[in-house]
Image: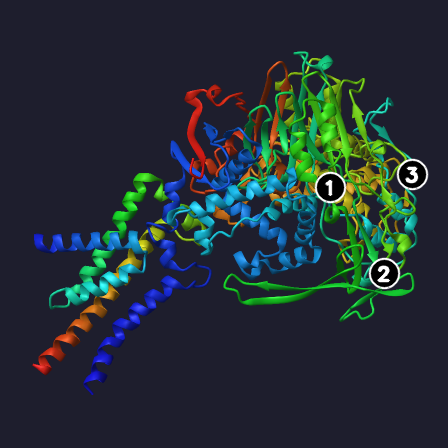
Amino acid sequence: MRNLGRVARLAPPVAVLAAVLYIGTCPVGPLPPLGPFLDPAAGIWSTATTVALPARADATIPGLTDSVLIRYDDRHVPHVFATREDDAVRALGYVVARDRLFQLELQTRATDGTLTELVGSAALELDRQMRRLGLARSAERELAGLAPDGLDRRLIDAFAAGVNAWIDELGRGQLPFEYHVLGRRPARWQPVHSLYLIRRMGYTLTYFGPEFERLRAANLVGTQAADALLPIRAPIQEPIVPSGESFPAFDRSPLPPPAPQTRSTTADDRTLGPTFDPRRRGASNNWAVAPARSASGHALLAGDPHLELTLPSVWYEVHVNVADMLDVYGITLPGSPAVIIGFNRDVAWSFTNSQADVLDFYAEELDDPDRPTQYRLDGAWQPLERRIEEFRAADGALLAIDTVHATHRGPVVWRDGRPYSIRWTVLEASGAGGAVYRATKARSVGEWFEAMEAYEAPIQNGLVADRSGRIAVRAGGWYPVRPGGRGDTIFDGTRSASDWTGRLALDRQPIAIDPDQGFLASANQQPLVGPDYLGGDPVSPWRAMRINQLLRSDSTVTPAALQRYQLDSRNVRANVFVPALLEAVTRGRAAGSLMPEVDDAARILDQWDRRYTKDNSAAVLFELAMRELARLTWDELSVNGSAQVRPSDMTLWRLLQDPASLWWDRRETADVVEQRDAILLSSLAAAMDSARARYGEPGSDRWRWDHAWSMNIYHALRLSALSALRIQHAGGPGTLNPLYAPRGAEGASWRMVVELGPEVAARGIYPGGQSGNPVSRRYDDRLSGWKNGELHELLFPKQSADLPADRVSAVLVLRPEGG
Amino acid sequence: MRMRTIARIALLAVAFAAATLVFGWWSVAAVGILWGVVAGPGRRAGRTAALAASLGWLALLVVTALQGPVLRVADRVGGVLGVPWAVVVGITLVFPALLGGGGAWVGRVIREGKGKREKGSG
C-alpha cells in the first residue's frame, strides 16, 4: 500500500515532465521538436551567430594537397586562390556549403525524388514525377561512365570532398536555419549530385513540347489549322544568326480557317487527347557588340538569364584562381564545380535557352495496362525495364510505392490512361560539366567553342566575346534527327522506324561569328531561317526585336548603354498590337458604332509610350486587352470556357492581317459573323470594364502597373516569411526586363555586362545575396540594388594581394591534413 | 526577496545554462530533478527551478544576442510559424521553465518519499 501511495504521489509530476519532454522531443503538427529547436545554444537561435563570417578562419580539408587562400570581398564573393585545380574545387565545395548547405540538399532531393524525406508528404507528387523521369538514374549512368582519373570525375570528387568537409565540421550551433525548422540534419553530398544539376536545369529548360497541344488543336480545328496555329517556322523572324537579309521579317499570309467543328464543346479530355502541362520556362537575353560598334573600341558582352527567382538565388558568385591554369569569375550553380556564366582574363560568355526540341513522345502498346511487363515493337513483345520506387517520410515511414517502367527509348509516362515513352537528350547526355569547366579556361572565342563541342544538353545559345574583339554565338548541342525530320508530333512507339536516326552535325548547327552588322543578340527566338527542324515551338521574338532595334541604332555602344538595355521596359509587342487596336477604333468611330468605354480605352492607349513603367496605367489596360483578344479570338480552341491550346502572339498578329478570316467569327453567336474589328473593339471594351472593376477609374492609385503586376521571389521552401513578395517591377511580357505573369516569379536571375579591354572590366548583380541564412543581411542584400537596376563592380584581382584591403570582409585559409 | 534566495536562483540559473551548453536542452529536466532532490523542504523548489531555468536560457539568449541578431531570428521564426516575434521569445523562456519546474517537482516528490521511508524505517 505504501508503494502504491508513493507511485500515486509521483504520477502527476512525472506525467507533467513527460508531457514537456514529449513536446520537446516529438514534432507537434507542423512544428519541429521544440527542445532542439528552441535550445538557445544549438537551436534556431544559433543561426544569429552565423550571419557573418569570422574575419579570419582556418580549416583542414582531407585530400587537400596545398593550402588554399580564400578572401571574401565586401560583396561576400569568395576569391579562391589555389595552386592546383583539385584543391580549388575542394575549396569551392567548402565555401558553397558554408553559405548554401540547405539549398544544396534541397535541389539534390528535388532531382532524385526524395523531397518527402526532407519536407514530408506534401512533396510526394513532385517526387513521383522525378522518379518516373529518372533524372537521378541518368546521372548515375553518366557517373559510371566517367574515367576514374579523368578531369570530370576528379572535379566532382573534389567538390564533394569540400562540401563534406564543411558538413563534418558543422558544430551543434551551425546548422542552417531550414534544418532547424524541419528538424532535420544535413545529408552527405555525393559526387553524383553535381551531375544532377545540369539535368535539373535540362528539366527546367527543355521539359516541354508542342506535341500534345498540337494533337488537341488538330482534334478541335483540323490538322491544317493546327499546323498554322503552332507553326514550326515563326511568323515573325528576328533570328539569332544574321543571314544578310533584312530583319525583322513578317509572314503576312492568311491563316487556314478552322475546320468545321470536329469535337463538341463539351468534349472531354479523353477525346481531345492528353494534356501535357509543363509550360515553357526560362527565357533569357544575351548580346555582344564588336569593337567597331563600341565607344571604347573593345568587345562588349551582356547577359541576363531569366529563371525562376528564389531566395537564396539559384546562382552563387565566385572567383577561382589557380596559378597559371585557371582564372575565372562568374556565377555557378551551387553544386557545380564550374563557373557557368562569367569571364576570364580573355573571354566572356553567357547563355540563353535555345528552345530546341530535344524531347519526343512515343505512343506505346503494352501487354497489360494494369501490370505491364512488355511493350510491342515491330510485331514482337519486348521486356519493359521495371523498377520499384519507394517514397518515405522524414521518419522513414513508407508513404507510397510506385512501379516505373521504361522502354529502350526511355521512361514511360501516362497521360489519360495511355502510355507514352519519352526519349529526351537530357537523360542520355553526358560531359556537360567538363565541357563548361574547360570552356572557362579558353583564351579565345575559338578555344571556347572547341571546349564546348563536348556539350550536349540542354542546348544553349552560347554567346562569347574575346579580348581580340571577336564575337560569336552558337546554339550547340545534341539535336536529334527524326525520321521525317519533324519532332512536333507523337510518334508510333510500336515501330523501331520511329526512333531517332542520328544527330545534327555540328557544322549544321546555328552559328554566327563576327557578323558584318557588328553585334549579336539572342533572346530565345528561332535561331535561324534554315532547312533543318530545330524546334516546333518558337518563342515570340519581341525581346529579340527590341534589342536588335537598340543595337542597330547605336554605333558607339558603352557598358552603361548595355546596362540600360537590360532594364529597358519598352514593348515591341505593344508596338505591333496597339496600332491595330487604335485603327479599329478609328474605323469604328467613323462608322458611328463606338461604345464609350472603347473611346476611353483608346484615349489611354493612344497616349502610351509603350513602356511598362511602374506608374503606367496603359500597360495594365493593354495586358487585359491582349488577354481578352486571345479569349475572344481563339474560342474554337476552348472547351467549356477552358483554353486547350494557346497560340502565340505571333500567330495572333498574323491573323490580324486578315480582317475577314473565319477565325474572328465567334461560334457562340450563331446568327452573326464577327470580323476582326468587332473582336478588337470587344476586347478593348471588356478590358476597360475589367480594369475599372479591379482598379477603379483611370488615374487611381490602384490602376498602376506596379499594383496590377509584381514580382515574387520565393524562398526555396515557399515560406512567405522568408520570401520577397510584391516587388514593384518596370517590365512585362515581351520587354527586355521581363515579368511573365501578374504575380510573376521569373525574371533576370543575373545581370552582367563585361568590357573586354586590355583589362577585363565587369559589372553584375543577382536578386538575393550570397548567404543562404535568412537571418543574415547577406541573404537579400543585393535585392534593392537589383530592383533599382544597379550593377555592382565585380572585383577580379590577379593575385590575392591585389584585392584592396579595405574591401576584404573575411579570410579563410584551408590547409591539408597535417599541413 | 532575500539575498540568499537571489543568489540561489542565480547559481541555479548558471547550472541550467551550463547544462544546456554542455549536454543540450533535455538536461534542464535533469538539473531540475536534482534540484528538487537536494533542495530543502517546502513547496518552492519547483517555482525556483522554473524561474532559474528561464533565466538560464535568457542568459544564453543574451550571449547569443551579443554575437548576432536574435530579434531578427525571432522575427523570421515568427513569420514562418505565423506568430509575433515576442511569442517565439516567450515560448523559448516558458519551455525551460516547464522543464526545470517539472523536473524539480519530480525531484521533490522523490525526496519526500525517501524522507518518509527513512522516517518509517527509523
- What residue does disc 1 label? A457
| Residue A374 tag number | none
The residue at the far front in this view is A818
Q: Are marks 3 and 2 in contact (CB under 8 Å)?
A: no
B44, A429: nearer the viewer: A429
Q: Are marks 1 and 2 in contact (CB under 8 Å)?
A: no
- What residue does disc 2 label? A264
Q: Position of residue A764 (x, y in %)?
A: 57, 27
Q: Position of residue A211 (x, y in %)?
A: 82, 50
Q: Judge from the rendering whether residue A612 lies leftward or rightward of residue A392; answer left or right.
A: right
Residue A709: in sight, yes or no? no
Q: CA distance from mark 3 to mark 2?
A: 26 Å
Q: Judge from the rendering whether residue A653 lies leftward or rightward of residue A555; answer left or right.
A: right
Subunit of label 1: A
Q: Position of residue A344 (x, y in %)?
A: 62, 24
Mark 3 or 1, nearer chain start: 3
The residue at the far bottom in this view is A1
Q: Judge from the rendering whether residue A279 lies leftward or rightward of residue A651; answer left or right.
A: left
Mark 3 or 2, nearer chain start: 3
A595, A34: nearer the viewer: A34
The residue that appears at 42% across and 30% down in the rendered structure is A811
Q: Position of residue A542 (x, y in %)?
A: 75, 32
**Quadrant showing the C terminus of chain A:** top left
Residue A606: quadrant of the picture: top right
Residue type at numbered disc 2: Ser
- What residue does disc 3 label? A254
Q: Residues within 10 Å of mark 2 (few under 14, many from 20)?
A: few
